[in-house]
Image (spheres, rainbow, N blue to C red):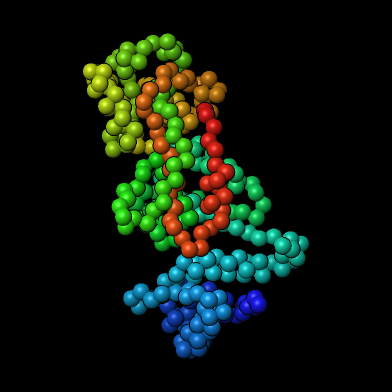
């Protein structure tokens, strides 16, 4: 038999989750700490899961607690507009929280999100930043998935699941007037726009020019795919870049794929955690994701 959820307990739980302490929440709610604790325990018993774990002097949400808070927020947002709720009986609002490496191609990100964008009842929350910050947010379960072109270091204790989404070719991209010239000629004589040395793509490029015995003329370096795209559009040089990054410019004729760098590929990955309560939207978008060519 399904347990009927006590909404009063749920409201108290939300207050504790927002405050992070029983003491502070009890003060704001004008309840004794012991009474509040008793009611939180009653909610945990009805749900069959611990919602908090103690950390120092505060309380942090367990994975079940984060899921409960998501639902609590949705319930109380709905309650604030009852007329809208009555007009949309049965609708369920679902949220997918995505982190993306700040330097990652925006075209790739949009392609990944495309199956969910515009779907009724689904909200996509996107956050960008350094990989370390995003992985910490993933472990704290404030993100459901991280998009990156850098595979995180893993060992037997690593919590990450790495899903390879796509492997894209890399080309020299620039004005169409360069089409037809050989790769060694272009690399030796034309100014180049390159990813910065710490990028995996740059390591592959450096190995290529070393094999060819060429010292390239570097016009610009950038660690951000969006900046590489802008530099290519400004004709600062020929860009070493996956064509997907400049898909619109290639389609319009503003830029051309001069020559493909055979043997150099850029990988795109989704990083998740093995979770007891996975967000079903993660599995859905990973299963449906396909990335077309530029």
- Residue 221 visible in this rendered orientation of the protein: no
Q: Between residues 146 and 77, which one lies in front from this camera angle?
A: 146
Q: Between residues 215 and 207, which one lies in front from this camera angle?
A: 207
Farthest residue, direction right: 87
Q: Residue at x 31, y 48 (%)?
A: 153
Q: Is residue 216 left or right of residue 82?
A: left
Q: Is residue 89 left or right of residue 189?
A: right
Q: Quick check: 42 above or below 92?
A: below
Q: Between residues 270 and 214, which one lies in front from this camera angle?
A: 270
Whole-percent x and y of residue 98? Answer: 49, 51
Whole-percent x and y of residue 276? Answer: 48, 63
Whole-percent x and y of residue 234? Answer: 42, 24
Image mark count: 0
Farthest residue, direction top: 180
- Residue 222 visible in this rendered orientation of the protein: yes
Location of residue 10 (image quadrant): bottom right
Q: Between residues 271 and 250, which one lies in front from this camera angle?
A: 271
Q: Residue at x 46, y 66 (%)?
A: 63
Q: Where, quadrant-wise, is the N terminus in this rendering?
A: bottom right
Whole-percent x and y of residue 216? Answer: 27, 21
Q: Residue at x 52, y 28 (%)?
A: 294
Q: Is residue 123 left or right of residue 171?
A: right
Q: Quick check: 132 above or below 16?
A: above
Q: Residue at x 36, y 42 (%)?
A: 150
Location of residue 258 (image quadrant): top left
């Amino acid at each position: 038999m399904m347990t009927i959820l006590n909404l009063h307990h749920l409201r108290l739980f939300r207050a504790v989750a927002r405050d992070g302490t029983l003491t502070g929440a009890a003060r704001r709610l004008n309840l004794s700490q012991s009474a509040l604790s008793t009611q939180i325990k009653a909610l945990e018993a009805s749900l069959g899961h611990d919602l908090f774990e103690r950390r120092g002097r505060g309380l942090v949400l367990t994975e079940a607690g984060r899921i409960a808070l998501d639902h609590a927020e949705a319930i109380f947002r709905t309650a604030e507009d009852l007329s809208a709720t009555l007009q949309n009986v049965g609708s369920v609002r679902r949220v997918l929280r995505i982190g993306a490496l700040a330097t990652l191609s925006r075209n790739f990100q949009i392609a990944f999100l495309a199956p969910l964008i515009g779907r009724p009842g689904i909200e996509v929350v996107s956050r960008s930043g350094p990989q370390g910050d995003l992985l910490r947010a993933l472990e704290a379960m404030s993100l459901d998935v991280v998009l990156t072109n850098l595979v995180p270091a893993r060992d037997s204790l690593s919590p990450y699941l790495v899903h390879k989404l796509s492997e894209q070719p890399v080309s020299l991209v620039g004005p169409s007037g360069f089409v037809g010239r050989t790769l060694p000629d272009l690399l030796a004589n034309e100014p180049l726009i390159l990813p910065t040395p710490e990028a995996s793509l740059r390591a592959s490029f450096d190995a290529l020019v070393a094999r060819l015995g060429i010292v390239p003329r570097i016009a610009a370096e950038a660690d951000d795919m969006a900046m590489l795209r802008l530099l290519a559009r400004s004709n600062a040089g020929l860009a070493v870049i996956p064509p997907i990054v400049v898909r619109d410019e290639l389609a319009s004729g503003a830029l051309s794929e001069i020559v493909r760098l055979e043997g150099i590929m850029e990988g795109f990955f989704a990083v998740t955690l093995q979770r007891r309560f996975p967000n079903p939207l993660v599995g859905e978008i990973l299963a449906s994701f396909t990335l077309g060519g530029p």
